[in-house]
Image (cartoon, coloured by chain):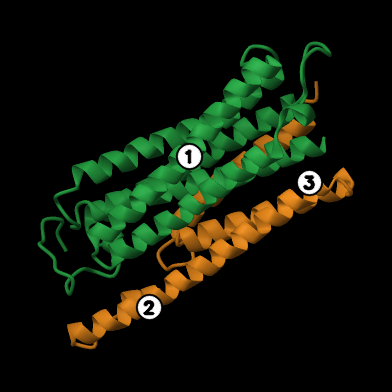
Chain colours: A orange, B green
Amino acid sequence: MANSQLNSGNPRVDIEYRRKKSAEEMRHQVVSFALMIFLTLIAFAVVAAKGFSAWFIVPFILLLAIVQVIFQLYYFMHMSHKGHEAPSLFLYSGLLVGLVTVLAFSTIIWW
Amino acid sequence: MQAEDKLTYETWPAEPEKSTLEAKNKFLGFWFFLGGETVLFASLFATYLALKDKVPDTTHTLAKDLYDLPLTFVATMLLLTSSLTSVYAMYHMKNFNAKKMNLWLILTLLLGLGFLGLEIYEFTHYVHEYHHTFTSSAFGSAFYTLVGFHGGHVAFGLLWITTLIVRNAKRGLDLYNAPKFYVASLYWHFIDVVWVFIFTVVYLMGMVG
C-alpha cells in the first residue's frame, strides 16, 4: 500500500498524508460493504421470487457469493495490500484442496 | 521496532500489525491457520452437499420445508454489518485511537451476539417443531456439523475479542497488542466469508431444492 512509504522528513506532514490515505481507504471499505449488502439482497430476492428455475438460481447465487467473498478478502481482510503473497498462497492452496473435496463428495458419493 | 517501545500518535507505524518480528510471525501464522480452516469448512460443505435431504423415511422434514428465509436474512445482515464494524475498529487502531477501536469492537461483539442468539433460536426451533436433530438423519448430522461448527467459531470469536478488550482495557495500544487485535479482526472476517457460503449453499440453495 502507498501508506508504507513515507519519508518527507517531517512527521507532521507524514501523519496528515497517512490519515488522509486511511480515511480514503475507509470510504472504499464502506462502498464495498454497500455492494456486499446489495449482492446479498439480490441473492435473497431471486430465491424469494420463486419464478426462476433452479438451473438459473444455483449458478447465479453462487457467482454472487464468490464476488462478495472477493470483496471481503481483498478489501476487508486487506489482501489487496502489498505483502500478502504468503497469505494468498495459503488461502488458495486451502481452497484448491477444499474444492477437490467438494467435487469428489458431490460426484463420487451420491447415495 | 520493538514491542516494548512507547509510541505516540506521531511515531505509531503505518502497519502496526507487521512492524515487529513477533507481529510478522503472527500475521503469517494466522493466515496459514486460515488456509487450514478453508480446508476444514470445505470438507464440511462437501459432506453436507453429499448428505443433504438423505433421510431414512418420509416422516423427516427436508431442507425445503425446514429453512426460513426471513430468519436467515436477518442473521446475514447482522453478521455482514459486524464485519464492517470490525473494519472500523481496525481503522481506528491504525490511527492510534484505542478508545474508538474498543467502541467499534464492542459494537461488533453485540452484532455477533445477536447472530448467535438467532442461531440458537433456529436450532431449538428445528429440534422442537420438526424433530430435526443431530441423530435423526444423515441430513441432520451434516447440517448441524457444518452450521454448528460455524456457530462455534462465532462463539469463540466473541470470547476472543472480549478477552482482548478486557485484557488491554487500561493499556492503550502498543506494538505488542495491536497485532493481536488485527489477527482477531481477520478471524472475524473469515467467519463472515464462511457464512456467505453457508447462507448461499445451505439456506438459499436448500430453498430452491
Whether residue B140 is situated above or below residue B17 in the rendered picture: above
Label 3 SS: helix
Label 2 SS: helix
Q: Position of residue B37 (x, y in %)?
A: 49, 39
Q: Earlier in the sequence, mark 3 or mark 2?
A: 2
- Could you tell me how far apart the alpha carbons at marks 1 and 2 are, in whole angstroms? 33 Å
A39 horizontally vs B114: left or right = right
Label 1 SS: helix
Q: Amino acid at mark 3?
A: Ala
In the rendered image, which residue does mark 3 sit on?
A48
Quick one: label 1, few (<14), some, or many (20+) residues within 10 Å? Answer: some
A10 horizontally vs B71: left or right = left
Task: Note whether residue B31 is visible.
Answer: no
- Could you tell me how far apart the alpha carbons at marks 3 and 2 are, in whole angstroms? 41 Å
Q: Amino acid at mark 2?
A: Lys
Q: Position of residue B129 (x, y in %)?
A: 68, 18
Pointer 3 and pointer 1 on the same chain: no
